[in-house]
Amino acid sequence: MRIAVVGAGTVIFRDEGVGVYAQRYLAENYDFDGDVTLVDGGVLGFQLMTYYTDYDKVIILDTITMKDDGPGAIYNIPGEMLLGLGSYKQTAHEVEIVEMLEIAALNGNLSDVNIIGIVPEDILSVKAGLSDTLKNAFPAFVNTALEELKKSGVEYRLKPTHLNLDAVIDFYANPTAPRKIGDMG
């Protein structure tokens, strides 16, 4: 089974970058058995369409706007449920994700898709990093993604070296900072 884990979002708008941070955190801290591709999807939008049609399973890590829950609430929503969930479509990349799912479904070649979404606290501040609320919820967010991979038959293990969330955020906040060989691949 070919599986793609796509981190979506914009790291310059605070909590909006949580999906990208989570994807990078997984890539830096875990080894996966099988055919698992970790993708820094950022805001690539329709350029990600091949993942939704060419892979057997796609896990999207992203913020999700849900009116009934507060910041830090985590959802694992099958893609077919999103096709009718208008409340998800709040930011530009959320609209693109749902539109890509709808196009792939209409063409009859939609992968098995899950959105692992977390309700953000702050997606308006132009600042790299996460609010304290999302930092506190981050381990549960990552564990939800790991659980979905395990349900798909993927075994994983921690790498011998471990990078914390702050190091991952710093990688994006200071992309030109000098780094030692092997710091973050």
Image: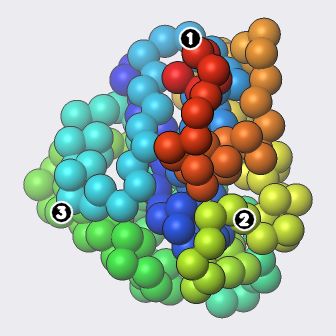
Q: Is residue 157 left or right of residue 124?
A: right
Which is in the foreground here, disc 1 or disc 3? 1
Q: Position of residue 169 (x, y in %)?
A: 67, 50
Quote the CA–CA distance across marks 2 and 3: 32 Å
Question: For mark 2, what is the residue?
Answer: 130
Residue 60 drawn above or below residue 97: above
| Amino acid type of the residue that numbered disc 1 sits on in the rendered structure | Asp
| Amino acid type of the residue that numbered disc 3 sits on in the rendered structure | Ile
Q: Quadrant of residue 73?
A: bottom right
Q: Would you say the residues marked 2 and 3 are in contact, meaning their CB atoms lie under 8 Å apart? A: no
Observer-nearest of 153 and 23: 23
Taking the view exactly as shown, the residue that stands out farthest to the bottom is: 67
The residue that appears at 68% across and 75% down in the rendered structure is 120
Observer-nearest of 60 and 101: 60
Image quadrant occupied by the N terminus: top left
| Element assignment for label 3 | helix
Q: Position of residue 126 (x, y in %)?
A: 57, 78
Mark 3: few/some/many CA within 10 Å (<14, 14-19, 20+): some
Q: Would you say the residues marked 1 and 3 are in contact, meaning their CB atoms lie under 8 Å apart? A: no
Q: Is residue 81 left or right of residue 134?
A: left
Query: Which of the marked residues, 1 or 3, is nearer the chain's N terminus?
Result: 1
The residue that appears at 67% across and 42% down in the rendered structure is 168
